[in-house]
Amino acid sequence: MSQLDPQKLPVHLAVIMDGNGRWAKQRMLRRIVGHQRGAETVKMVVEQSSLLGIKYLTLFAFSSENWSRPALEVRGLMTLLKKYIRQETARMMRKNIRYNVIGNRTDLPDDVNDTLDEAIQKTAANTGMVLTLALSYGGRQELCRAAARMTEDAVAGKLSASDITTELFDSYLDTGALPDPDFLIRTSGEMRISNFLLWQLAYTELYFTETNWPDFTINELHKALAAFQARERRFGMTGDQITERGDLSKD
Ligand code: FPP
């Protein structure tokens, strides 16, 4: 654990928490039990990320496509989410963590939205880590929402085609106030993005582990972060340019 360089941690860590269902199936348990165990891993990752000084943590907790799951599982996930937020808000206050949500909140049940609003409001002045939950979230859907809002602004005469830059587009996304993720972890051996943060992941370092989310441990998190620290991020430049930039920044 001590090998991590605190200066070289991701500013923004994003996680696709996959494998809850398989974890449960392997143990002949109901899928919701896998999600419940997954919520325990969420607590650990939130606590560790905040302790390490990571500024932004974004968790893919429920996708736009997850609505197609059996109604019982969807209801179970919504109940779990509500319970988690209610239980954890006091800890978020103690750890100075601020809640944030991205995704299509109009699809969420009213009671979940009320719980989220309360937690967001209560933690709004916290200045530590920003914990973003992606709920009813899909990257393509987010891009469409952004395009629709830009069109509305264009029709209202507040925006013209020549104003459209990557920065402006960024500001219309749900993540407008967040920097792009530096590092993405996906558990359970699947090597895909699954409609998560499609625009924002353009230069993100990707990390995949075979471990199912409920089994993901502190040691695994540290191992993943150590792997991030060994990566050379070039953002389209050459390795030599990056080395020179690094040398200059030491002056
Ligand atoms: C993917 O595993 C996981 C989800 C769809 C839900 C993630 C939810 C949690 C980790 C718990 C609640 C979240 C919070 C923030 C408290 P899967 O069910 O797709 O697994 P499988 O691919 O093995 O079936």
Image (cartoon, rainbow, N blue to C red):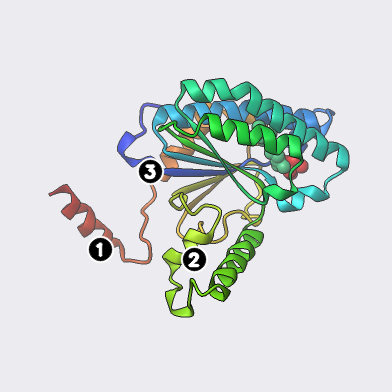
Q: Secondary structure at mark 2?
A: helix
Identify the residue position indicated by label 3 in the image: 229
Q: Residues within 10 Å of mark 1 (few under 14, many from 20)?
A: few
State the SS at label 1: helix
Residue at 55 percent across and 26 percent down: it is 44
**Label 3 SS:** helix
- Asked if residue 11 lies left or right of residue 85, the reply is left
Which residue lies under the disc numbered 2?
169
Q: Earlier in the sequence, mark 1 or mark 2?
A: 2
Task: In the displayed orientation, state which residue is furthest to the right.
Answer: 71
Q: Amino acid at mark 3?
A: Gln
Q: Is residue 107 left or right of residue 127?
A: right
Question: Type of residue at label 2?
Answer: Phe
Q: Is residue 213 visible?
A: no
- The residue labelled by disc 1 is 241
The spot of residue 198 in percent (x, y) is 57, 60
Ligand 1 found in image quarter:
top right
Quarter holding the N terminus? Answer: top left
Q: Residue at x 71, y 49 (%)?
A: 106
Q: Is residue 135 above or below residue 54?
A: below
* Of marks 2 and 3, the one in the foreground: 2
Where residue 155 sits in the image (x, y, percent)? 57, 75
Q: Which mark is residue 142?
A: none
| Front residue of 123 and 190 | 123
